[in-house]
Image: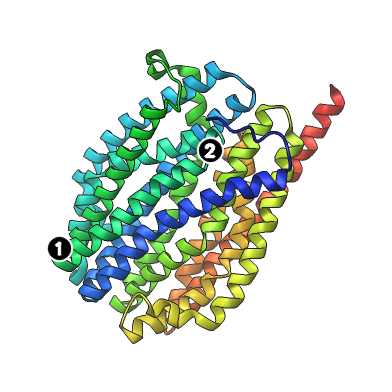
């Protein structure tokens, strides 16, 4: 099942690996967008706001799990790239053990804290009960969400980005069908949206496990599941900084959501809808991050660092080209696009303002995401944590707060604050990349 990505055209490898990854992200993002679209057809603004806030919390948790799973992808890819089957099997087994224990602990903790989470989010009073119902169901389904993401990380570490795409495609179809049934036929509201998402994830996991067992795609022994300090240590060393980085990014989004929530129900709904749209438009930057991580790690494991650097360059070029096109397009269709998710004209107008500013982030984020993927592939995920943390603390959150305070009639400056944060990250990434490259050249000269 392993695909060798250390030979052949680097550009072709980037494209062939990233396309299935892109489609996987598209289908996964379609989950949340489908929830918002469908509930807006059957419920009012309060229920739409409940789903947008609840799904943002779940997105934050999922992103952090994916970030932690990056440690598994990189560890598996480096071992596979070096041709070490024993180390590959140990990395796979320890990944499963670590994440299953983590998912059970998270489920218990979050269920106990769900009321406090709804309060911290400054949820409008009209949407409190719906948000609480949505989160309760989703928190129960965390083991399924975790299982899908670790299966996907294992496949991608082995160079296979197609299988996770097929698994998530099954889940997406099931989710949309269940959404219409639970929200349209049974009128379960936000709880129905959460139930559809959770059950569809469970179906995806069952299908993937059935395929793995039937085809014997992954070769591991019982001993590989026993925790090993060195293996677990590497998984956590790479994954924890990425998870914290992604968590801080999502926390910044949550803070911005809280700021918007305090401006009233209209702005709260507008920001929630735009976050979903941005999640969709960030598919290519996100796929480039994961592509550079997996391909770069395999090439570094094979002793070909120059191919890893070339992977970074091609990924950044692709992401930038996409970003330029999207920035131009959104300036003309912002309000109609937001209007697809709400019949409320005021929400569509406010969302259009926010989107016109926020969309610039699709260009800048493409570059910094590619750099983050490269740093992860090198085992230097701490650099990604550093530049994102500085961006959040110094630019993104303060910028959103000041924009909300001094421009109460428009959401445009708040959107621009997000883009400014990514631009700051790029500056830090370029400096870090230059330092790493210089050190590598000195090491080569010394040897």
Element under disc 2: loop
Q: Nearer the viewer, mark 2 or mark 1?
A: 2
Element under disc 1: loop
> Measured from the top left, where is residue 259 in percent x and y?
37, 68
Q: Residue at x 84, y 21 (%)?
A: 447
The residue indicated by pointer 1 is 188
Q: Horizontally, is 231 left or right of 171 in the view?
A: right
The residue indicated by pointer 2 is 160
Q: Horizontally, is 204 left or right of 364 in the view?
A: left
Which mark is first along the chain, 1 or 2? 2
Can you name the residue that lies furthest to the left here?
186
Q: Horizontally, is 110 left or right of 306 in the view?
A: left
State whether residue 52 appears in this view.
no
- State whether residue 394 is above or below residue 297: below
Can you name the residue that lies furthest to the top here?
223
Q: Residue at x 42, y 85 (%)?
A: 409
> Measured from the top left, where is residue 90 in percent x and y?
47, 19
């Amino acid at each position: 099942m392993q695909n060798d990505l250390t030979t052949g055209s680097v550009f072709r490898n980037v494209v062939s690996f990233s396309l299935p990854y892109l489609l996987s992200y598209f289908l996964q993002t379609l989950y949340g967008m489908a929830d918002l679209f469908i509930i807006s057809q059957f419920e009012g603004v309060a229920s739409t706001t409940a789903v947008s806030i609840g799904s943002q919390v779940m997105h934050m948790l999922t992103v952090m799990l994916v970030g932690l799973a990056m440690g598994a992808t990189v560890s598996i890819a480096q071992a596979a790239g070096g041709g070490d089957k024993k180390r590959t099997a140990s990395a796979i087994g320890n990944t499963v053990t670590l994440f299953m224990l983590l998912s059970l602990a998270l489920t218990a903790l979050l269920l106990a804290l769900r009321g406090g989470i709804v309060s911290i989010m400054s949820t409008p009073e009209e949407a409190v009960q719906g948000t609480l119902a949505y989160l309760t169901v989703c928190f129960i389904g965390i083991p399924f969400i975790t299982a899908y993401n670790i299966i996907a990380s294992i496949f991608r570490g082995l160079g296979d980005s197609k299988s996770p795409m097929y698994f998530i495609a099954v889940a997406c179809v099931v989710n949309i069908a269940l959404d219409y049934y639970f929200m349209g036929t049974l009128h379960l509201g936000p709880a129905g949206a959460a139930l559809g998402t959770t059950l569809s994830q469970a179906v995806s996991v069952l299908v993937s496990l059935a395929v793995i067992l039937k085809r014997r795609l992954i070769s591991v022994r019982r001993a590989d599941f026993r925790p090993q300090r060195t293996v677990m240590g590497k998984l956590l060393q790479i994954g924890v900084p990425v998870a914290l980085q992604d968590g801080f990014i999502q926390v910044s989004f949550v803070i911005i959501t809280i700021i918007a929530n305090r401006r009233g129900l209209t702005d709260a709904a507008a920001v929630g809808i735009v976050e979903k749209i941005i999640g969709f438009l960030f598919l290519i930057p996100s796929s480039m991050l994961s592509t550079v991580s997996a391909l770069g790690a395999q090439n570094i494991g094979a002793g070909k660092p120059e191919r890893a650097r070339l992977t970074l360059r091609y990924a950044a070029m692709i992401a930038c080209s996409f970003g330029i096109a999207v920035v131009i397009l959104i300036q003309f269709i912002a309000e109609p696009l937001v209007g697809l998710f709400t019949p409320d004209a005021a929400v569509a107008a406010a969302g259009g303002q926010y989107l016109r500013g926020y969309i610039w982030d699709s260009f800048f984020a493409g570059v910094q995401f590619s750099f983050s993927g490269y740093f992860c592939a090198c085992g230097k995920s701490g650099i990604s944590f550093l530049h994102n943390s500085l961006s959040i603390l110094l630019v993104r959150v303060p910028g959103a707060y000041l924009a909300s305070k001094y421009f109460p009639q428009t959401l445009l400056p708040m959107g621009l604050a997000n883009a400014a944060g990514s631009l700051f990250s790029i500056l830090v990434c370029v400096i870090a990349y230059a330092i790493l490259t210089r050190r590598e050249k000195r090491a080569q000269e010394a040897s």
